[in-house]
Image (cartoon, rainbow, N blue to C red):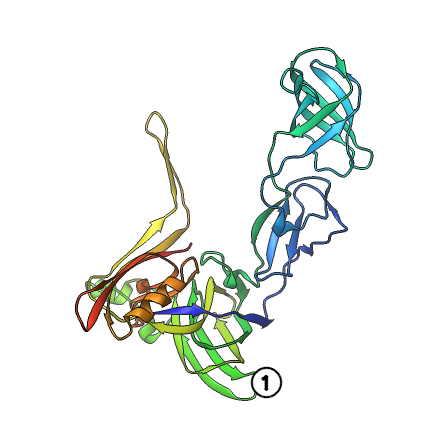
Amino acid sequence: MKVIYPEPIAMTYTNVAVNSESEWSDSTTYTVGDLVQVTDQTPHRVYKSLRGNNTDKYPPDNVDPQTIESASSTSNTVGTGAKTFTVATGLGFVAGMVVNIAKSSTPLSVNMTAEITSYNSGTGALGVSVYSSKGDGTHAAWTITSEDEIGFWKLVESTNQYKMFDEYVNTKTVNLNLISVKLNVQRADNIALFGLTGNKVTVALWDATETTKYWEEAVDLTYGAAIVQQISDWYEYFFGEYSVKEEVSLRSIVSTYNGVLTIDIAAETGTNAECGNVVVGRGLGIGKLQHGVKAGIIDFSQKETDDIGRTSITPGYWAKTNNMNVFVENIVVDAVYRKISSLRGIPTAWIGDETDGMEMLLVFGLFKDFSITVSGPFHSWCDLEIEGLI
């Protein structure tokens, strides 16, 4: 059994088209629902604006809920109905947002709750419809605070080019006929690919100038040993459905400190090639996997039953789980302990068995728990609980 210690990669080429969303700009004012992409981080991401008058708010730093607050010196009488205030300009107030309007000096005893009907970010004119109030009198020192705590941006997904390099398997890079990418890699001798759809995967390792090919391997996803069919009778032999290989792990015969890794995922002409995740790095041996592995899944589908017994089901994503017992030689047991510990909180590829027909033991995820039992002077046992990511 082994695990891939992921190394930094940089994609230098892809045949997958860029997303249609415009690049985020700090000088553009966005409205509710506007979509942008941010490409100065890896993976590239798509974000959706949750507020109007959304200017100079860098999406990755502004997804957490935030309140909007402004002072106003507009004279108004406490009570329900339509009212107007002048507040600061350039804020994220939008129609439909609920705000609390409180007298600045005595906010608990004099306040109103209202729904925003209009806001002019250029002049600061704020129109509201007050539906509840407390206290009385006319006042000219207010603090207006939004009750809807939302961020300026919502992360939608990675761009299509980078879905195969994000933290998930079920978000897939999709392209007609072929996905072809080139990666700058360092100290890489193992690669794992998850969520594959296609006919064939070809991986090659080159030098930095792409003139010398160190290694190449191709895996057929639909023919030969890569395809599995459970046969219980003659009918299934002739007419049974096949299960196509969706995960692949490969090991290069060489490792390079500065190389180019090419990945080609080919599909049948006229159909989509797909890839959910790619892990590239150094293979770290843990030990010999023992019989008795438990492989399962976590199902994130939602089931709701109403008070008269009607059940509705919303299909969700799912993730693999593995519980493994590994035989470890004591001469390396301390190194194995450190290796696994160093991967805490780091998603990567855990490879229990590379034999065809054992894809269930190839998991992209995290170790949930592990322990090592030193059972004697020469060997130990490592119990690993691996939890996949969707």
In the figure, is residue 337 to the left or right of 52?
Answer: left
Find residue 295 and report its horizontal and vertical position in percent.
Answer: 28, 58
Is residue 213 among the parts visible in the rendering?
A: yes
The furthest residue to the right:
123
In the figure, is residue 150 to the left or right of 219?
Answer: right
Amino acid of disc 1: Thr
Q: Quadrant of the C terminus?
A: bottom left
Secondary-structure class at tag 1: loop
Is residue 244 among the parts visible in the rendering?
A: no
The furthest residue to the top:
136
**Looking at the image, residue 302 lies above or below residue 199:** above
Q: Residue at x 71, y 14 (%)?
A: 78
Find residue 308 and report its horizontal and vertical position in percent.
Answer: 33, 25
Q: Which residue is mark 1?
A: 209
Front residue of 195/207: it is 207
Q: Tell me which corner region of the image, top left, top right, bottom left or bottom right, holds residue 194.
A: bottom left
Q: Tell me which corner region of the image, top left, top right, bottom left or bottom right, holds residue 101.
A: top right
Q: Residue at x 61, y 61 (%)?
A: 41
Find residue 50 and report its horizontal and vertical position in percent.
Answer: 64, 41
Q: Tell me which corner region of the image, top left, top right, bottom left or bottom right, holds residue 33.
A: top right
Instruction: Assess disc 1: are there few (<14), some (14-19) or many (≥20) residues with their C-alpha within 10 Å of its C-alpha.
Output: few
Q: Quadrant of the N terminus?
A: bottom left
**Looking at the image, residue 103 lies above or below residue 316:** above
Front residue of 148/17: it is 148
**Looking at the image, residue 316 lies above or below residue 72:** below
Could you tell me how many numbered marks the image carries? 1
Q: Residue at x 62, y 65 (%)?
A: 17
Find residue 16 and report its horizontal and vertical position in percent.
Answer: 59, 67
The furthest residue to the bottom:
212
**Looking at the image, residue 297 lies above or below residue 18:** above
